[in-house]
Structure formats: structure tokens, C-alpha cells
């Protein structure tokens, strides 16, 4: 990340769940759904819906990017390898998963600090309240919308389609 303030999601880097650094500019021109995930959460079955969205729209330039977090109720206590194995084995996850991060507080990943500032939640709060908070990012790297944990992935299809069409 440059010393200037970030202006898009492409100004950030992360680590893949396998521990390899990745610049998010590799997703430039794609529509992204960035999600904080957890393996032992009541919303964990949403991984299946997220994978279905990825399968349905990937060829049109869409990707889901999962960021495991253990901040909420200790619901993702495993190692990155354990999380990757769980997601693949139980939900067939093939979309990009990043290394476990924090999404709140002083240790929050810079990407998540930026996402929260770009699209605050209910009543303007920037705090991520729970697992499976989702951010839809347009092809230009700008945040379009923030979704609550209970927002089911399949209900996001119209917004994803609109974002894909807008940048085509």
C-alpha cells in the first residue's frame, strides 16, 4: 500500500489462506463480495450460498473473497490449514480464502478498516457486529453496499448482476 490514503480495494494486500502474499489489484476489473467467515458460526452454512454465487457469476468477472475471523464467539479457532480444509470439505469452497484476520479494533486488517469507513453499518457504526458481514465491491474497486450477517447470499444476486452489468 502506498503512503497516500487508499482509494480503492486494489490498494490493499492480504495473505492467502496458504500464507502467500497477494495484492488485491489481481482482482482489478472484477466485482467482489468480501466476507468475514467463520467455521463454527450459525451462519456458516452461508458458505454454500457464497460458493453458489461464485460458481454462477465467476465467468462474468465475479469473485467471493473470504476472510476468516475468530473475533466473534471464538467461532473460527482453527489454523489456516484447518479452516481451508473445513471449508473445502464441508461446503466445496473454491473461491479465494485469505489468512485469518481481525476485522475490528487496533489489530483490524487495513482492508477491513477501509471497508468499514467506506460503508458504515446501521446508524453509521463502523464496527463489524458478527461473522458473515459482506461488502459488495464494483469493478472500479469501490464499495457499493454492505450487508448484514443474516443477509442470505442468494438474496444478493440482483445487486451482483447490477454491478456486473454496470462495469461491462
Image (cartoon, rainbow, N blue to C red):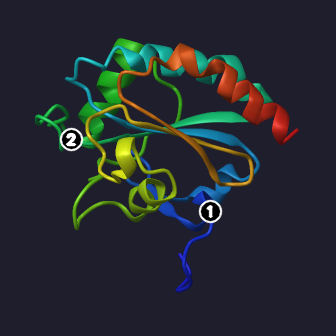
Toward the viewer: 98 or 123?
A: 123
Which of the 4 image quadrants contains residue 132? top left
Label 1 CA crowd tier, 10 Å (few <14, some 14–19, many 20+): many
> In the figure, is residue 82 to the left or right of 96?
left
Circles 2 and 1: CB atoms closer than 8 Å: no
Give the number of the disc on residue 8: 1
Quadrant containing the C terminus in the rendered view: top right
The image position of residue 35, as x and y in percent, is: 43, 37
53 relative to 146, above or below:
above
Q: CA distance from mark 2 to mark 1?
A: 29 Å
Q: Nearer the viewer, residue 137 or 26?
A: 137
Note whether 145 is above or below 114 in the view shown: above
Q: Identify the residue shown where x is 64% and y is 19%.
A: 157
Where residue 73 appears, x then y in whole percent?
A: 11, 34
Of helix, strand and loop, which one carries label 2?
Answer: loop
- Among the two numbered marks 2 and 1 on one chain, the one whose residue lies closer to the N terminus: 1
Q: Quadrant of residue 144?
A: top right
Amino acid at each position: 500500500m502506498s503512503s497516500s490514503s487508499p482509494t480503492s480495494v486494489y490498494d490493499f494486500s492480504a495473505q492467502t489462506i496458504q500464507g502467500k502474499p497477494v495484492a488485491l489489484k489481481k482482482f482489478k476489473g472484477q466485482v467482489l463480495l468480501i466476507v468475514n467467515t467463520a467455521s463454527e458460526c450459525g451462519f456458516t452454512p452461508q458458505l454454500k450460498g457464497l460458493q453458489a454465487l461464485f460458481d454462477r457469476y465467476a465467468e462474468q468477472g465475479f469473485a467471493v473473497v473470504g476472510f476468516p475471523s475468530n473475533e466473534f464467539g471464538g467461532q473460527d479457532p482453527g489454523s489456516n490449514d484447518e479452516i481451508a480444509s473445513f471449508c473445502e470439505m464441508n461446503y466445496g469452497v473454491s473461491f479465494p480464502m485469505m489468512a485469518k484476520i481481525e476485522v475490528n479494533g487496533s489489530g483490524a486488517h487495513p482492508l477491513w478498516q477501509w471497508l468499514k469507513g467506506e460503508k458504515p453499518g446501521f446508524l453509521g457504526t463502523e464496527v463489524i457486529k458478527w461473522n458473515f458481514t459482506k461488502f459488495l465491491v464494483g469493478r472500479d474497486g469501490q464499495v457499493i453496499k454492505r450487508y448484514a450477517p443474516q443477509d442470505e447470499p442468494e438474496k444478493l444476486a440482483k445487486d451482483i448482476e447490477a454491478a456486473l452489468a454496470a462495469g461491462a
